[in-house]
Image: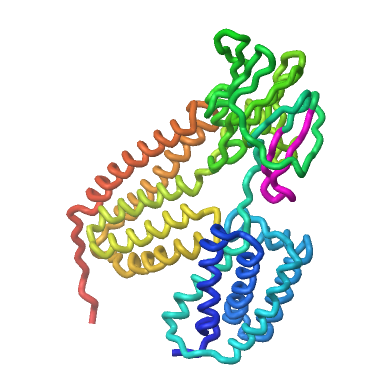
Amino acid sequence: MRLTWIGHPLTLLALVVLMVNDHVLKAAWPGFVTGKLSDVAGLLVLPPLLDLVLRRPEVSIVVTGIGFTLVKTTAAGAWTASEAWTAVWGPSKVLADPTDLLALPALWAAWWASRRRVPVREAVVLTVVPLAVLGLAASSTLPERLGVAYAAGSDGDRITVYTEVPGADPYLAGRHTTDGRSWTYDPDVGLGKAAATACVRERCHRIVPGRLKVEESTGGSWTTAWEVPEETRDRLSRAHDPSGRTSVESVSVAATERLVVVANGADGVVVRDETGAWRRVPMSALGGRHPAVSLTTPGRHDTFDYTLTAGVLAALLVLVAGSRRAWVGVGAVLVAAGWVLAAWTRDALLVALSVGGLFAAPGVLVLCLAYDRRRIPWKVPLAALAFGITTFGATTTVFASWNIGLLTFYADAVRLATVLFVVLLVLGAVAGHRAGRGHRRTYDPVPK
């Protein structure tokens, strides 16, 4: 038992409030109360965490107060916090808001708790600390997403493009145009409604859902007016967002006598002017931050962590097959689970290290204790290393092939990499089993 501040009932209550508020209440009742509740809870949890390092309660409280004030009242402080949160939690945005200083009296409650430490078992402390770190890391951040053009509408000879740009103020806005070249900003345009079809007199245009494609009709059949090939759209999507979370497709169309404008999500809009020529307009011209992407852009992929994970899993399987020891298998499973969890949460460095290490660290310890050179021949770890490198290289090569155009679609690269991974796992298991078969070593007695 030890006297701790982090284990004080007030701190534990604040931790529960922080996690429930950020992940449940904010989504159900966003607004002033839930926003300030997170600030109060965070100011109660952060000082005892800092005190584990600083060992000075007063200093921990002062540092927390000064840091919180700078973040909430200065652009530089908010930017610094955004960069720090992005490094440990993935792309995030921390907003300066002086009204959050109303939560500062919570530091008095934190000081009160620091003067009344309670006896807590070390196991409880080791459980609470990771939860407190994760709770604070996940709090008060906005995910940094790409700006998109989500709708287009017409009013007389004017067309309005409705945009959503996370982090902007306001993040929902609009741009008006009458010629397709100059755009007038309108922050009070309101919500736009996507229209799949737009008609002027007898000429109609419609989008093709799931594609970068527009069709037109003049009273007869529909013909293609503008289109980006699917393989090019696949590369555009990955160029805008290598993670694949942002879609690039035609979502809305608007028309006047002179213009046709199509909203294409993260790719901005495409405009047909009075000459009949189609021209892409990037989100950077509509208030977004990401620049134009050429139609000839090479493929971009964010797969290093996944291909490295494939190599690690292959190496672990070969090691288990060659050793044929139960505890080696247990350690390998723990390491594999930790590694996969870390790769899955790779956008958040702190989460990846915390969650992944929770499994991987004990797994490495078990592997070290279970590994016996007298019973496991040197060929087994050598085969594990060889198959790990081969698997990593083979799966990486597949995505590089898509990158230079040897494979048409990203999905093709995913399927081929998966097949290669499975094949190499099977071959690795067989090779590991053979490397560890029939190994018998004798040792001379220790001389007296």
Could you tell whether 116 is left or right of 186 in the image? left
State the image coordinates of residue 73 (x, y, percent, origin top left). Answer: 77, 66
Residue 172 falls within the magenta-colored stretch? yes
* Quadrant including the C terminus: bottom left
Closer to the camera in the image, 314 or 207: 207
Location of residue 113 with respect to 304 vertically, above or below = below
Question: Could you tell me if residue 37 is visible in this image?
Answer: yes
* Quadrant including the N terminus: bottom left
Closer to the camera in the image, 166 or 131: 166
Residue 439 lies in quadrant: bottom left
Find the magenta span and give its range.
Answer: 161-177
Location of residue 271 with respect to 65 vertically, above or below = above
Could you tell whether 396 is left or right of 293 in the image? left
Q: Which colour scheme is used?
A: rainbow
State the image coordinates of residue 364 (x, y, percent, origin top left). Answer: 38, 65
The residue sitting at 39% across, 48% down in the picture is 388
The residue sitting at 68% across, 74% down in the picture is 103
Could you tell whether 3 is left or right of 48 in the image? left
